[in-house]
Amino acid sequence: MVDFSLIISTRNRAARLGKCLAAISQLRTHGEWELVIVDNAATDDTAAVIREFKRQAPMAVLATYEAKPGLGRARNRGLSVARGNIVGFTDDDCYPTPDYIDGILDIFRDREIGYAGGRIKLFNPRDWPISIVDKAETRIIEPFTYIDGPEMKILGANMAFRRAVLMQIDGFDDAFGSGGPFLCDDVDAFARASLAGWKGGYFPGPTVLHDHGRDEEAARLLTRSYAMARGAYFAKFILRRDSAPPYAKEWILRSARECLLRPRDILQEVGGAFAYLRHRIAASTRSPRDVSSRARRSEHSSAEGTTVGNAPYSLEQQKPYRRPT
């Protein structure tokens, strides 16, 4: 085991990946850490960029390949080879600041913290201000809290978990994440960690610069995709017995508040919910012979001797579910 693993998943963005890796080569820490790069079935020069960086990298680099596109699936592939007690994630168009790792490790000195989101600043001021979080105040999220990632300032471009937490919640949902059926693999994982009894939060110390390159039109299209993913997210947690009442209530109240302000987004959410239901029905008809990636991850973690299930609150505790204040 090492102190920290940083996982980056990439697909067909070789030029941006090179800039990201150049920034990562400037990271400084006294902790023992490694970089995990997941080639998510790229067809451009990504493999060559990874090979060249690995040849001269100043840190340990583990490169792996995930043949099926999807960010959640790719992050699970990275997790399967990562050795860090703390596992961080950023995107291939983000540039962590040199003190990023120490900022993450400082957060997890509090043993009750299971997951965290950090600051995400806009790299290019000409880009549309979307997918960024630039707040100076820490926000703690108590266990069993309804999770709204953007509202709570925790997003996947800068997030970290205890490895034990990711093993406990069975990693990321393969159906979620860019390149898959639905976005918001990050918020889904935060929510399941919260339901598992872990405290988390937004912490402004660890910082990345997001070079996403989107203009107003691209941001508008992304917002629609977010709305569809939000519907899938609500549907998933309404189908869970331990979270159905608060998530159903939140969706109803949210829709009532915003139906006149953004009716198109509400329709996208409804469409996303039905799409998720179709996805679940299709998944339930798969052959029993199919071995899920989750089962393989569980076998891997058992073989590696990973400790799971050590959240500060046991799953059996009947804690009141909280809506954020």
Image: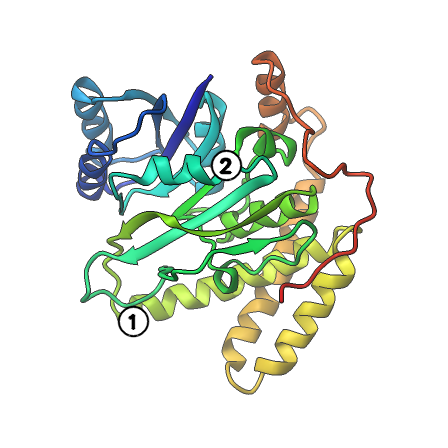
Residue drawn at point x = 56 percent, y = 60 percent: 148
Q: Residues within 10 Å of mark 2 (few under 14, many from 20)?
A: some
Residue 174 versus residue 216 in the image, above or below: above
On the image, numbered disc 2 is attached to which residue? 108
**Is residue 181 something that shows in the picture?**
no
| Distance from Cα at disc 1 to Cα at disc 2 | 38 Å
Amino acid beneath label 2:
Phe
- Give residue 52's quadrant in the image: top left
Q: Secondary structure at mark 1?
A: helix
- Give residue 258's quadrant in the image: bottom right
Amino acid beneath label 1:
Glu
Give how far across and how far down residue 85 sits, in percent. Answer: 50, 25
Question: 84 or 74: which is nearer to us?
Answer: 84
Which of pointers 1 and 2 lies earlier in the amino acid sequence?
2
Q: Nearer the viewer, mark 1 or mark 2?
A: 2
Give how far across and how far down residue 4 sits, in percent. Answer: 41, 27
* Image quadrant occupied by the C terminus: bottom right
In the image, taking residue 325 as reference, residue 187 lies left or right, namely left
Residue drawn at point x = 52 percent, y = 60 percent: 152
Q: Which mark is residue 217?
A: 1
